Image: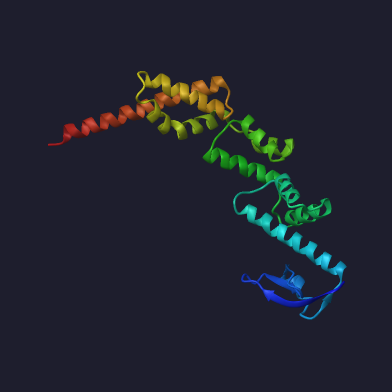
Amino acid sequence: MPKRIAALRVRRDGRKITVVLEGGESFPLTAKAAAAFSPGQQLSPGELERLKRQSALDDSYARCLGLLGRRPRSRAEFERYLRRRKLDEAEIALVLNKLAGQGWIDDRKFAREWVENRQAFRPRSVRALGMELRRMGVTDDDARDALEGLPEDTAALSAARKKAARLLRASGKNPDPGREFQRKMTAFLASRGFNYDLARETARNVWEEQSRIEDGEIEKKTSSRKKSP
């Protein structure tokens, strides 16, 4: 049975129009899609179904863009999200193709940016990064491209330095703080995917580095006190 449009209400953001049907039922449309309709116009059941599906597609696309506000996403992540929204295969393909056409989906770029971000803020091994990328649906080729030439020892050293201050405080009360620090640091680096030999060597090097820094600070303070009148 056809239904009549009771009102078209502009939403606050001005980008969508709420279509209100007689009886109170409503659904949103983009301003462009709603431009073809007016209050009093009758909509057939088929046309109503088409408009509601278009509304769901537009909403899903907008929500995908909202996810990008938190962090970049792979194509597979978007696809899993759209499946949870109960879209069928054809609808998922439409949304994904629109995202790709607008430049929002590029798995090779996504993989490179993911690795760069991890190495800047939470460094980990090549193996661990590869596993993360594959869990997010990145292909082996794109993962290899992003990880090619990544220096494992540099990443381990960066991770250890970021963790050093906390482990120094945690190891300070131990009778043998150097040994305790290195034990905890080795375990930490292993949890980030680095192999045992590299983790142990890096832990030792960072302990020596931190010891030199601490000795230098003590020497500066002592020298400063001696110079004071």
Could you tell me which residue is drawn at 73 percent across and 52 percent down? Answer: 85
Which residue is outermost to the bottom?
40
- Quarter of the picture containing the N terminus is bottom right
Q: In this view, does 72 lie to the left or right of 2?
A: left
Q: Can residue 80 be seen in this view?
A: yes
Could you tell me which residue is drawn at 53 percent across and 37 percent down? Answer: 122
Q: Quadrant of residue 21?
A: bottom right
Q: Point out residue 36 in the picture as x, y percentages from the top left corner.
A: 79, 76
Q: Quadrant of residue 123?
A: top right
Q: Point out residue 113 in the picture as x, y percentages from the top left corner.
A: 62, 44
- Quarter of the picture containing the C terminus is top left
Taking depth in this image into account, of 181 and 100 the one nearest to the observer is: 181
Q: Can residue 145 be seen in this view?
A: no
Taking depth in this image into account, of 163 and 142 the one nearest to the observer is: 163
Taking depth in this image into account, of 138 and 4 the one nearest to the observer is: 4
Which residue is outermost to the front?
23
Q: Is residue 2 left or right of residue 15?
A: right
Taking depth in this image into account, of 199 and 41 the one nearest to the observer is: 41
Is the residue 131 above or below the residue 62 in the image?
Answer: above
Q: In this view, does 184 lie to the left or right of 32?
A: left
Q: Point out residue 161 in the picture as x, y percentages from the top left corner.
A: 46, 32
Q: In this view, does 157 lie to the left or right of 44?
A: left
Could you tell me which residue is drawn at 76 percent across and 53 percent down? Answer: 96
Could you tell me which residue is drawn at 70 percent across and 44 percent down? Answer: 108
Q: Quadrant of residue 97?
A: bottom right
Display coloring: rainbow
Is the residue 27 above or below the residue 184 in the image?
Answer: below
Q: Point out residue 8 in the picture as x, y percentages from the top left corner.
A: 72, 76
Which residue is outermost to the left?
229
